[in-house]
Amino acid sequence: MTMPHPDLVAVLAGLLAVLIVASTIGYVLERRLSPDGSNAVIENLNHRIRAWWVMIVLMGLALVGGRTGVTLLFAFCSFAAFREFITLTTTRRADHWALAVAFFIVLPVQYYLIWIGWYGLYSIFIPVYAFLLMPIIAALRGDTDHFLVRIAEVQWALMICVFCISHVPALLTLEIPGFEGRNVLLIAYLVIVVQMSDVLQYVWGKLIGRTKIAPRLSPSKTVEGFVGGALSATAVGAGLSWMTPFTMFQSAFLSLVIVLMGFFGGLVMSAIKRDRGVKDWGHMIAGHGGFIDRLDSVVFSAPIFFHLVRYGWSAT
Amino acid sequence: MREAGISLAGTLILLFARFLTAVRGQWEGIAPTDEQRIYFANHASHGDFVLIWTVLPRRMRLASRPVAGSDYWLKGRLRRFIGRDVFNAVLIDRTSPNRGSDAIGLMTDALDAGSSLIVFPEGTRNATQDPLLPFKSGLFHLARARPKVVLVPVWIDNLNRVMPKGEFVPIPLICTVTFGAALNIAEGETKKDFLARAQAALLALSPKASAP
């Protein structure tokens, strides 16, 4: 293993500092306002900060571990997200083999293709090969009840949980002149901008949020929170241009795209949760619901960010 | 050496169960304490008591013995090792002519030795569309034999989708194990009344019962 790039060390040190500050604030708030654990907002905040520690440590280890570490981490995230998604679908006995193939063949193959960097195949493997193969397997079982719905559900689950998430580690396969050996910073950049946008929208919404943006989907999202969060996260993204191959304006633009896709991705995933009558996708992370609850914004922004960067900056 | 092998096998089975199902225990009607109990659960898969076992805290897990059919668990070395050594199951011979009284005897022996029990009162795996099969009378006789020990209903959700009867590749899906409020047999309660009450208590824990 080689030493991580100095910029990566700087990013991780920065995140560590932010987390220490956040934990300190959380601790002080708890001592002052909620010593008996009765203030739900503060309890929730502290749960989130604790889960953040776990995520940052895992993320840091993966980033230091290079392509293999990052690919393994996101393959596991895909697995957990896919497991949550399929739990909520109406799949039945006749889908058993199609699902087994999706879990134990399609998912590992997709990540293997990313690990070896075969762009020509990993960018179409799921939408072409998997999407045609899986209905065939399901049809062979002969159960036609709700066939279209079942097929569509499994395909969308694969699209969201495997295809989209796999575009995060795919960022490592880009060859950007003058940026060699630093691609992990693109992942750190994407994740930081997405998560800052979530946090800042939450904060702005709590401070000045009045007008609900989509009351039926997500009662906590407000116009003020969205605009404030999006603009400040874009500003944060612009300020992070030093860790990317982008200029400050380019970085602001890409951050805005990431933030918008992340926001609308969150809305879409909320709509699915409403439809299924659940509040969270799962129960994996205390204070955060399931994996998909944490990944929904990254899911929608990762492929777009990947292709914009590939089109605009990559040599291949 | 043998002890280490048993404990390693137990840990591997727990890890595998968590990997497949991310199972979580929901202690809704009762707290996870060391009290002696008879857990009775719905039965759709051979993995059922593995899930209950996985969500029990370690000390309670070691004190809890599943009750299972010896015709299945004594067949083959691996099953025998898992059933008898790893799970420490109370094995019941379902083919013996006076199986009823023998089975109750084995279970009360285990209770008298201080163990908790995990039983599946449907008697066999449920492969039907109904949420529960009618309970066999075993639970009633057991409750009558040791009326002081509390009975805890346990609903296992989703495991039948992970591995339907007849499939051999499991699908990863999230499962939950819900523990309801304890019940005891009442003085003079008839078999019919008691079994109906126990069945209703278990069914009330299923998510479909609470869905609108």
Image: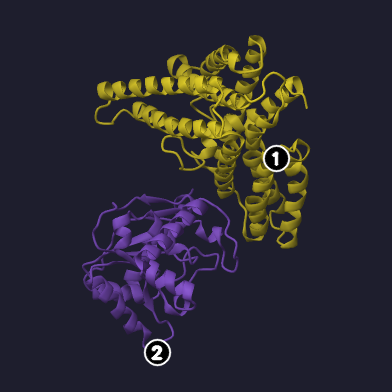
Chain ID, mark 2: B
Instruction: Give the colour in which the image draws chain A.
Output: yellow
Q: Please identify the quarter of the rendering in which residue B119 is found.
A: bottom left
Q: In front: A265, or B211?
A: A265
Do dots 2 and 1 share one subunit? Answer: no
Counting other residues with Cα less than 10 Å from the Cα at mark 1, is it few (<14), some (14-19), or many (20 or more)? few
Shown colour of chain B: purple
Could you tell me how far apart the alpha carbons at marks 2 and 1 are, in whole angstroms? 63 Å
Quarter occupied by the N terminus of chain B? bottom left
Residue A173 numbered mark, or none: none
Q: Which mark is residue A116?
A: 1
Left or right of B180? Residue A89 is right
Residue in view at x 53 percent, y 31 percent: A64
Q: Read off the residue under disc 2.
A: B97
Number of numbered callouts drawn: 2
Q: Kindly tell me whether residue A31 is visible in this rendering.
A: yes
Rendering coords of residue A140 (x, y %): 75, 61
Of residues B9 and B58, which is closer to you in this image? B9
> To which quarter of the image does residue A141 belong?
bottom right
Q: Is residue B195 left or right of residue A116?
A: left
Q: Amino acid at mark 2?
A: Pro
Q: Is residue B190 above or below residue A251?
A: below
Q: Is residue A213 visible?
A: no
Question: Which SS class for mark 2?
Answer: loop
Which corner quadrant of the image does residue A50 belong to?
Answer: top left
Observer-nearest of A310 and B57? A310
Give the class, few, some or many, for how many residues have Cα within 10 Å of label 2's Cα (few <14, many ≥20).
Answer: few
